[in-house]
Image (spheres, rainbow, N blue to C red):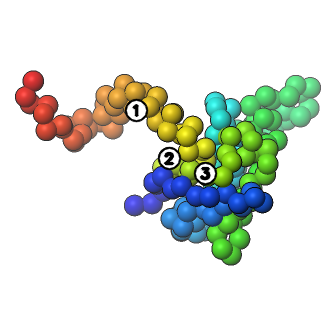
Amino acid sequence: MQGFLSYSLHRVDKKGRVSVPSNYRAYLMSREMTSFVCFPSLLGPWLQAVTPKQMQAFMGRQNPLGAFGGEVEAYPTLICSQAVEMIPDSDGRIVLPPELLAHAAIDEDIAFVGQGSYFSLWSPPLFEAEKIKLRERAMAERADWATHTGDAAAMPRRADADHG
């Protein structure tokens, strides 16, 4: 299985350096990529991380003549102006800029949170609080996921489902 999976807790040193989980680096390498792009989430106090190919796809959705239109495209401007390409060094470490650390309220510890085709970086206490909300939303979305896959019968059943 490939993708950005798992939750991994790491320490950020005084220079803003942190080791990227080895399985995340291995996934990037398997896709012939040596970097990822990190930017502040517009939805809350965490950092979003995507592959360079995903960032290129995002930028490909912009109006190529938008600069001549006299209007600033808000969404891509906010994302692109704050995005930073992260290239792990030979020890697998990156340096997170102070403005990214501040946005996510990351001090000494950082959580790498796998989300399949991308991942996010969080202050561990903030992610723990968010997990409660995510669990509630996940339960509400569960039926949609089963229907969306087209094979609801393949969804695992709880052992107590037949007893009530």
Task: Write the residue at 61% across / 47% down.
Answer: 121
User: x and y percent of residue 77 in the render?
Assistant: 80, 35
Tell me the amino acid under the disc marked 1: Arg
Q: CA distance from mark 2 to mark 1?
A: 14 Å
Whether residue 58 is visible, yes or no, is no
Is 90 above or below relative to 35? below
Q: Give SS at disc 1.
A: helix
Q: Give the residue pinned by disc 2.
A: 115
Q: In this rendering, which labeled residue sits more in front, label 2 or label 3? A: 3
Q: CA distance from mark 3 to mark 1?
A: 21 Å
Task: Write the residue at 46% across / 28% down.
Answer: 133
Q: Give SS at disc 3.
A: strand
Where residue 110 is drawn, which disc sits there?
3
Is 1 above or below relative to 158? below
Q: Which residue occupies the extreme bottom position in the image?
A: 90
User: x and y percent of residue 4 in the render?
Assistant: 50, 55
User: x and y percent of residue 119 in the render?
Assistant: 56, 49
Direction from residue 2 to residue 50 in the image, left or right: right
Q: Earlier in the sequence, mark 2 or mark 3?
A: 3
Q: Earlier in the sequence, mark 2 or mark 1?
A: 2
Tell me the amino acid under the disc marked 2: Gln
Is 12 above or below relative to 58? below
Among the 4 quarters of the image, the one containing residue 144: top left
Quarter of the image containing the C terminus? top left
User: x and y percent of residue 31 in the render?
Assistant: 56, 65
Q: CA distance from mark 2 to mark 3?
A: 16 Å
Direction from residue 159 to residue 68 in the image, left or right: right
Whether residue 103 is visible, yes or no, is yes
Q: Tell me if label 2 and label 3 are in contact, CB under 8 Å.
A: no
Direction from residue 93 to residue 149 in the image, left or right: left
Q: Which residue occupies the extreme left position in the image?
A: 163
Among the 4 quarters of the image, the one containing residue 91: bottom right
